[in-house]
Amino acid sequence: MGELKTFKGGTHPHDFKELAKNQKIAECDVPTEVIVPMAQHIGAPAKVLVKATDEVKRGQLIGEPAGFVSAGVHSPVSGKVKKIIQCNTPIGTTCQAVLIENDGKDEWADGCNVDTDVSTLSSADICKKVAWAGIVGMGGATFPTHVKLSPPPEKKIDAVILNGVECEPYLTSDYRLMLEKPETIVEGLKLLLKAVDCKNGYIGIEANKEDAFRIMDKLCKEMSGDGITLIAELLEVKYPQGAEKQLIKAILDREVPSGGLPMDVGVVVQNVATASAVYEACSKNRPLTERIVTATGDGVKEPKNFLARIGTPAKYLLGKCGFKENVNKLIYGGPMMGMAHFDLEMPVNKGMSGILSLCNAEVYEHRRCIRCGRCVEGCPQQLLPSELSLVIESGRFNDSKDINVLDCIECGVCTYVCPARRPIVQWIKLAKYELNRQRLRAAAKEKK
Amino acid sequence: MSNNFIVNTSPHIKTPAGVNTIMRDVCIALAPAFAFALYRFGYWSIAVTVIAVVSAVVTEYICQRMRKVKVTIDDYSAVVTGLLLAAVIPPNVDWYIPMIGSIVAIGIAKHCFGGLGCNIWNPALIGRAFLQVSYPTKINSGTWAAITNGKMGTSIMGSFSSLVGKSKTSTDIVTSATPLEQLSKVSFNANGDLITSASTKVVDRTDDCAIWVSNNVIQIHKGFINDVFLGNTFGCIAEISAFALLIGGLYLFAKKIISWEIPFSYIGAVALFGWALPAPYANTVGEIAYTNAFTGPWLLHIVSGGVFIGALFMATDMVTSPITRRGQIIFGLGCGFITVMIRLYGGYPEGVCYSILLMNTVVPIIDTFTRPKVFGTSIKKKAEVA
């Protein structure tokens, strides 16, 4: 294990991937009603283009991007718009959503689902297609992909990394995708490389998914050529290996500067599911209307990996897995960075790689820091989480800025390992929120 | 049903190790040392331990009630303090000694500073230091009567009893010095190179001697180190057997409760400075002389006294040691250096207690100077320069 590439810090929680690991991707039938939220990405929520009683077809644009950092939303089914509602988002806010009654015909909108020869597409065509298809980072961060593919001209991109690490415990959606549709991923990678005019593509995979690695490795070797090098990298099993900065460090040994972006070191990182979606958009003209979702945890009898339409309520998916009565926590995403929510009706969105239900979730009472140093040892950003927690606990938000609170990637390692059960990440999020508010307030004052 | 879901921030899973499991593991790790104490000193040593632990827990309870904070005696931290205090006091003290020690340790060293996590100094060592200055005659190792069960190696027994001018025949109770006492206060007879403790009576050099000086080099009797390592010697309740402590230390390593940095740097520094620094002794004409540098009995320095309990259990106390690995190495080196300085040139025969307390004091400074380099910051600076 020592020879595998990795980063400094991190920890390895028990990954519980065995629950859903061997479940083949099952196409989930479409419910009679889907709820399509307009805020499925980072940035401005999309603007609703339809109104009640409108007929829509699958792939039809129903929410248009409201700015550059935004993404379009497409109807995942054909049918009739019932009404425009407010719906919960996993992060705890609400947004507009379109409630569509499914007519069961699954008719594609004009121009969608038409095969195109991808080799004829130029770099600009690919970017345009990606933006048209409303593709966002499908690993959970949901950053609009076309923005990542349009770096300012002074930033030269020389590597595209696909993130197939899936270091979050429980989740297996990327793993199943790599096993079952590896060609779409590698084809997607080639398109991404072309989009940013770069020759080196990498796919990072954790060593606990060795079978997926072997498949990707073989495919990468086969599909390299024409000056393009594709390399699959086996990485040490360690959380958060899939964090963007840590992944770049592990594969290319480059450190994204504090406050910077991957493009500052010439890298674009995309999730494997995103690459697959890019390929579907370019080759088949299919907007992003479905994704793979792992429904798992001890709260379901049979954990499964679904290919589910965007807008499918969580309850619908969980119902197909045998949802237990005594579930006491519902998490959208993985257990380390996912969001707990009370709403079972939350629809699947573009960034939802898993729905996790737990029966024995506990709420801990925290104690004083005993300075054991486990958080310091585990922090992949080499921060002092213990110190941050003490500073923020006493309300000194500005002091926390001086000790690099803004460099925290909120991976949750510190809070996972803390024997005093201190909610360190929660405090850090609070401090970031407060600092941001102060910044906005100061900016507003200056304007006056 | 959906109303009963827990909603809080990520991460939603936690490691099983909590404060209480860590402290419980420390208690388990101390078990071999106390088992050896029972074998070596008899039941009173365990009675002293029980008194120390009970007083520590009761004091913790009272302090937390007085401070109106949550009572957390179930986290075992007071138990650990009680055990560690008992470990470093002699086995035959009066019943109130461990009690006073524990009250000071928990009441003053811990709760006056805010309880677990906020104390600057290791509570058990503060308790021990308090006892040492308050009851020097009871705590000072040179004058207590060590109870033996007659199982000591005869050569050691002989050397100890002869060195303090008592009968050479084995007895069950002898008043004697610890090996360190002898290192610290060596003197010679007119004929040659015998070293004794501070005793006025000088005995001829015989094979029964454990330690002596010859040609300005400290000599140690064959087998003596072995006996000291295993614990066939005098000393405090649970510090005498480096071997038993080592077993406990390995358990803590295995459980990842302590890391190698502090124990290794501490013991390494004791060995290094114990070997390198010249030791003072009184020569044949009663003048202070020094042994040759780089000839010190480093092995004896390591295995005797409180080095093992200090390095494995006291200095590794999470609350009072630096938080980064680099800082821990500096901390361990400092502890080792001060330990040897006190042993060789200080007023006490043993320096472990004060060395750790002194280094505890500078932990905030060490932490300040050993901050890890935040990911991505080194490159930013380079970019700015360019």
Image (cartoon, coloured by chain):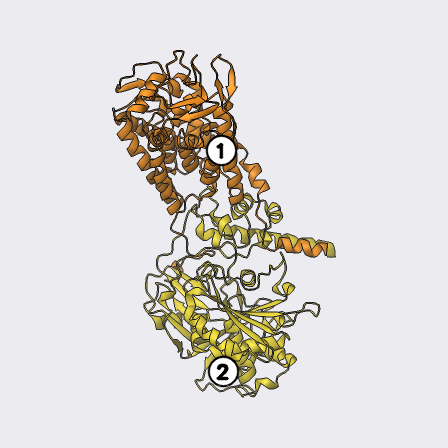
Chain colours: A yellow, B orange
Q: What subunit carries mark 1?
A: B
Residue A318: image quadrant is: bottom left
The correct choice, above or below, for A123 with respect to B51 in the image is below
Q: Mark 1 points at which residue?
A: B336
Q: Is residue B375 left or right of residue A310?
A: right
The correct choice, above or below, for B93 with respect to B316 in the image is above
Q: Which of A327 and A21 is in front in this view?
A: A21
In the rendered structure, which amino acid carries the disc numbered 2? Lys
> Nearer the viewer's eye, disc 1 or disc 2?
1
In the rendered structure, which amino acid carries the disc numbered 1? Gly
Q: Nearer the viewer, residue B66 or B90?
A: B90
| Residue for point 49% across, 82% down | A80
- Disc 2 secondary structure class: strand
Classify the position of the C terminus of chain B by image quarter. Answer: bottom right
Classify the position of the N terminus of chain B by image quarter. Answer: bottom left
Q: Are marks 1 and 2 on the same chain?
A: no
Q: Name the residue under label 2.
A: A80
The image position of residue B167, as x and y in percent, is 29, 14
Q: In this view, does B60 lie to the left or right of A135?
A: left
Q: Nearer the viewer, residue A125 or B186?
A: B186
